[in-house]
Image: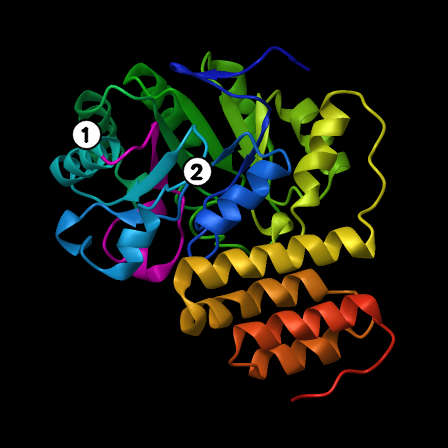
Amino acid sequence: MNTEPIRIGTVALEGRVLAAPMAGITDRPYRQLVRRFGAALAASEMLTSDTRLWHTSKSQRRLDFSGEAGPRCVQIAGADPVQMAAAAARCVSLGADMIDINMGCPVKKVCSAMAGSALLQDEALVAQILEAVVAAVEVPVTLKFRTGPEPANRNGPIIARMAEDLGIAALAVHGRTRADRFRGSAEYDTIARICQDMTIPVFANGDIHSWQKAIQVMEYTGASGVMIGRAAQGNPWIFRQVNHALDHRPQPAAPTAAEVSEVVTGHLHALHRFYGEYMGVRIARKHIGWYLQDRPNGKALRRLLMAEESASRQLQLLQSYFENPDIPLKAA
């Protein structure tokens, strides 16, 4: 397994574990958190390539890199090469160090516009988009995609070869097809075939839920690194664990209740500041659910927190819980 530092074009990464961009999840507070725990790169949530829609508060937040350490990577999605190129150039002018192209999202709303993983069925259009975006910016451009439109047409190796030939600097491959969505298990044979044919870095993605699985997938596929998505929700420690394994260091001790409390409350504070109290409290609820999963009395606390409208009360309930997790809490 290669242990040399990874370079994506002009950008040097300080690790081999990336955080997968996820709509509604990888906002600035989340990106800063996972970087703290060892994610070498954390791309933004998917941003539409239609810059006419960027006046919305949602798009403005997705382009907010204030206080965020580089490399800053923005993921864009769309089906029009000219529009994608213009969006990429605009992102760079706003501070992006890298551009990631989304051809992996299987969500109906995205695919119905022939964007995301729907593009994989049109290899000619894929080539036009990649060529246009690479030509539009001087920063590295990466591609996140799936193994193909459907199991009968796993054209991932063709897309990968095309991408490298057109100047894409790195690939992240999810081991499912568009038709699979998130059902079943990820398959890594196609990723292994892609890795054998590439000279640019390739990151394996899909069902990597532990440091053991990360090592297994890297060894099986020959991937340069891994990209972790859902397994990091409520569990940013996974990046630290995988990094220790890759560096052949002993695994760190499991986080104490005090550390979990500090991370959860810090994350919530950041969400409240970033979105404001009204939106911050509501967005925090899904993260709270993930953090409390499998913890003592976690379900009961989660029910209380789902009904809370106050940022201060949300934080107070969490603090009380972590001080005495076995004592049932009551609503205000």
Quarter of the C terminus within the rendering? bottom right
Instruction: Indicate the amino acid at tag 2.
Output: Glu
**Towards the viewer: 239 or 93:** 93
Q: Is residue 55 left or right of residue 292?
A: left
**Towards the viewer: 200 or 181:** 200
The picture places residue 134, in percent across and down from the top left corner, at 24, 23
Q: Does 103 lie within the magenta span?
A: yes
Q: Does 108 lie within the magenta span?
A: yes
Which residue is drawn at the image coordinates 82% and 36% (left, top)?
252
- Does residue 176 appear in this view? no
The nearer-to-camera label among 1 and 2 is 2
Say if 128 sits above or below 318 in the image.
above
Instruction: Indicate the amino acid at tag 1.
Output: Gln
The picture places residue 142, in percent across and down from the top left corner, at 37, 28
Q: Which residue is mark 2?
A: 68
Which residue is drawn at the image coordinates 74% and 20% (left, top)?
247
**Towards the viewer: 278 or 133:** 278
Which residue is drawn at the image coordinates 46% and 67% (left, top)?
280
**Towards the viewer: 105 or 319:** 319
Q: Quadrant of residue 330?
A: bottom right
The picture places residue 188, in percent across and down from the top left corner, at 60, 34
Q: Quadrant of residue 192?
A: top right
Rounded to the nearest whole Å, what is the CA distance between mark 1 and mark 2? 32 Å
Callout 1: helix, strand or loop?
Answer: helix
Say if 201 sits above or below 88 in the image.
above
Range drawn in magenta? 94-117
Q: Is residue 324 left or right of residue 279?
A: right
Callout 2: helix, strand or loop?
Answer: loop
Q: Which residue is mark 1?
A: 128
Instruction: Mark 2: give few (<14), some (14-19) or many (20+) Cα within 10 Å.
Output: few
